[in-house]
Amino acid sequence: MSSTSSVSETPTLSQSHSGIPSRLLHKAQTAKALIQELRTEPGSTDHPQLPIIPQGISRSHFHSAISELSTQLGQDNVSVIDKPPKDDGWYMEHATTHDMMSVVPKHEFMASAIVYPASTAEVQTIVVWANNHSIPIFPISMGRNLGYGGAAPRVRGSVVIDLGRRMNKILDIDSEDYTCLLEPGVSFYALYEEVQRRGYKHMWIDTPDLGGGSVVGNTLDRGVGYTPYGDHWAAHSGLEVVLPTGEVIRTGMGALPGSNTWQTFPYGFGPYSDGLFSQSNFGIVTKMGMTLMPAPPDHESFMYTFEREDDLAQIIEIIRPLRIGNILENVAQLRSAVQTLAVSGRPKSDFYKGSGRIPKAVVEAECANLPIGKCEWIYYGMSYGPKHIRQYKLDIIDAEFKKVSGARRIDPATIPKDNYFWSRDKIAAGEPDLEELLWCNWVPNGSHIAFSPVSPIRGKDATALLDITNKHQDCQGVEIFPAFVVGLREMHLIVECVFDKHSPSACEAALASMRGMVDDAAKLGYGEYRTHLALMDQVAGTYNWNDNALIKFHERLKDALDPKGILAPGKSGVWPSRYRGRGWEMGDGKETTEGEGVANGVLGGKL
Ligand code: EUG
């Protein structure tokens, strides 16, 4: 074990909106020390002239536009990126100038400047400014969209709007309606701590694997958590949005002045517009309502292990009716043994000195020494309610899982307190933790990018997707951790691809394997629920039914709502007219982010 004494202290929530709760400071220090221990120096990197100026505007015009904005927002709230970023940082102290886990050279997804608005009115000011100067802007909440691009903009040289730093208020927690109203800078950590501070023992939040992300940002990206409320988008109610031309709207009941129903009824009247602002570039969300869960009287985690990789189809077939029937009550995970080995935080080289993929026999032998024992798959779940209700469900689950030969239930009483099982236990009860990314340490300078297809909860779908995953792992020699995250009627397969970001060949292999998986999945009718900036054009291109009817619809909306094409161009593969047909798309052998200029003209905006 490494010593944590040489490691500088991680900011806590009392010091920064994006800090760690003090209860988790020791975990942060340990995680940070491990990362530092495994870090090697990057090779020489060529830096382009900084700041990176977005296409369509001259360097001098950019600088005069920036000084105009500084006058409006204050010098301290506009920061030009004119020096190469010192460091990528790590999860808790991440870079917001670029993708800290980039598979392409850092400068490809790099901002020109970061601005820090303090209010919705200041966001409007920025949007109007961007329209006047035809400068692309890219909003982030916390900037922890790791595995999907982090804080980085799709178009290099965009001005990143860091909404989180100064707009981080919990505007309301209603302990009778079980709702809250949040600004973008509220993390899952911060929301959890505030619910505790107010003594609301009867309320739970729903948290992803790590708690540092923005509740608003994660929900807009349609992220998941692990209580019965796992689908964050489904649990939200009401948005405040700054449109790309600067107007502000409130959706749902928020459009009715004086309504007290904004956070309790999500739809309001007429067309339901919220969907347009999720994974989109049609507006900047400055407030969001969210429902909270009543704490059940009691809860208990359980874990099953399965012996063979080939058991997968049978396990998934067992899960489907239990999950849809709510016997399995939470968004649970079926994880591979190798990921459990890796979440110890130890590098692969501790277990295996050879090159290439760690042999199955080594994984098995190592797992035999862990509480999980020798196995291929591990199911982590939780049962909620009083003892007799839980027992009813747990007996059914036990009988069903034991139909898989060799399935074992691991008695939690036998699992040491520092085991990852207890991290999942907290998360499934809405308490945000900090363990998940320890598996990045599997390789030096470990970074990750995710392949995230969705499918029905069927054995044949699980097998088909796992075959694709294994095929690309074998061809590319990259490290891959698959985990099935089971929603209510579908499952998200999250394939985390871990690579050494300082190795250009590893980065290339990681990106190539992602591209291969997306293509192969699409051929079989599978699509991703979310993706990295570098893959957005490719993934959007797979949703092409009826001669690309959906993307054309998105483009019409984009041009109507954002005629100058300033807001997050290219996000989710939606390009405004000024960029369209000019080679801005990535993929098909083109792994640079820029196209051949931008148009002026009717929809192009003045320069
Ligand atoms: C996970 C990770 C994701 C995601 C959903 C779940 C869980 C990892 C990186 O993206 O979209 C263990």
Image (cartoon, helix red, strand yellow):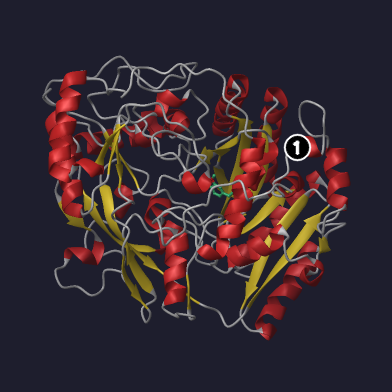
Quadrant location of the C terminus in the rendered image: top left
Judged from this view, the residue extending furthest toward the front is: 6
Badge 1 crowding class, 10 Å Cα cut-off, few under 14, some 14 to 19, many 20 or more, is many
Q: Is mark 1 within 8 Å of ligand 1?
A: no
State the image coordinates of residue 344 (x, y, percent, origin top left). Answer: 72, 49
State the image coordinates of residue 271 (x, y, percent, origin top left). Answer: 24, 56
Residue sitting at 15 percent across and 22 percent down? Answer: 61
Q: Is residue 141 left or right of residue 61?
A: right
Residue sitting at 66 percent across and 39 percent down? Answer: 37
Residue 172 appears in view: yes
Q: Is residue 500 left or right of residue 64?
A: right
Residue sitting at 79 percent across and 57 percent down? Answer: 305
State the image coordinates of residue 406 (x, y, percent, origin top left). Answer: 87, 57
Decide: is 183 above or below 587: below
Q: Quadrant of residue 298?
A: bottom right
> Is residue 459 or residue 205 the one in the foreground?
205
Decide: is 165 above or below 348: below
Residue 461 appears in view: no
State the image coordinates of residue 585 (x, y, percent, origin top left). Answer: 39, 23
The amino acid pointed to by label 1 is Lys
> Is residue 593 or residue 237 the one in the foreground?
593
Instruction: Say which residue label 1 marks.
Output: 348
Q: Is residue 190 left or right of residue 340?
A: left
Helix, strand or loop at mark 1: helix
> Is residue 549 or residue 527 the one in the foreground?
527
> Is residue 181 or residue 72 the one in the foreground?
72
